[in-house]
Image (cartoon, rainbow, N blue to C red):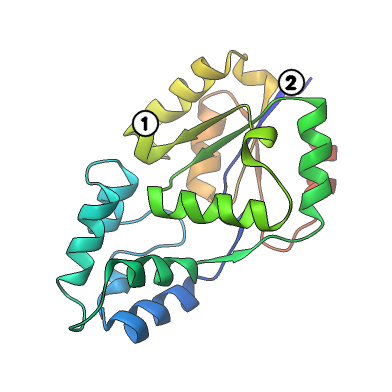
Amino acid sequence: MTKAIFFDIGGVLIDLDFEACLRAFREILGFERIDEILNPYKQRGIFGDMEGGRITADEFRTAILAESREGAVPEDVDRCLEHFLTGMDPKKVPLLKELSARLPLFTLSNNNPIAMGLSRKVFAENGLAWENIFTDNFISCDMKMEKPGPEIYAEAIRRSGFAPEDILYIDDGTANVEAGLKAGLKTVLYVAGEDLRALIEANL
């Protein structure tokens, strides 16, 4: 019996546009090597360092601006990342409200401080108060652990207070889903555009 749900954020709850983000970094900032550090599932280089909590958001912005066109400012970096998060399917709004009234929901995400702020903004724009939906958040930059490493799953399970077999874990990354399965979670791979409600109801 499912007693709690772990959600990945980007690609599951919030839609992503990888190519639009690449274009924004090149066009807005003139930062040409964005494809070397930005990945739909696991970031690399300074982007990976920010998601892993090894550098701060300000340090990331400074590093990006050092290779950007003259006149670019920190806010431009955030504006580029905003192109990665394109919004939320309206059908997920009532689903999250209903689910959060039935059982504890948690996030388990490779994420960074800038994108987390943008994610909360997307939720607010859809009439969702983040704190009312999620019981706790297991975020890579805060925990200094990253999926698909086993440590982040073990710590998320421990902090949730639930047995792994009682937790449904939904992610759009195959490696992450496989790692969740090894950790004992009930895992589901979500494909963009899929009916999330039907997927969850079939696995509760």
Q: Residue furthest left?
A: 66
Of residues 61 and 47, which is closer to you in this image? 61
Q: Which mark is residue 103?
A: none
Label 1, on which residue? 143
Residue 130 position, x and y percent, is 63, 40
Which residue is the site of mark 2? 3
126 on left or right of 65 = right
Q: Specify the amino acid type for callout 2.
A: Lys
Task: Identify the residue shown where x is 83% and y is 47%.
Answer: 94
For the C terminus, which image quadrant? top right
Q: Is residue 29 left or right of residue 156?
A: left
The residue depicted at 53 percent of the width and 20 percent of the height is: 157
Task: Residue at 48% x, 46% y: name it.
Answer: 175
Q: Residues within 10 Å of mark 1 (few under 14, many from 20)?
A: some
Q: Report the mark closest to the observer, 2 or 1.
A: 1
Residue 57 place in picture, x, y as percent: 29, 52
Q: Earlier in the sequence, mark 2 or mark 1?
A: 2
The amino acid on which the numbered mark 1 sits, given as a three-letter code, is: Met
* Residue 37, visible in the rendered structure: yes
Find residue 107 and report its image quarter. top right
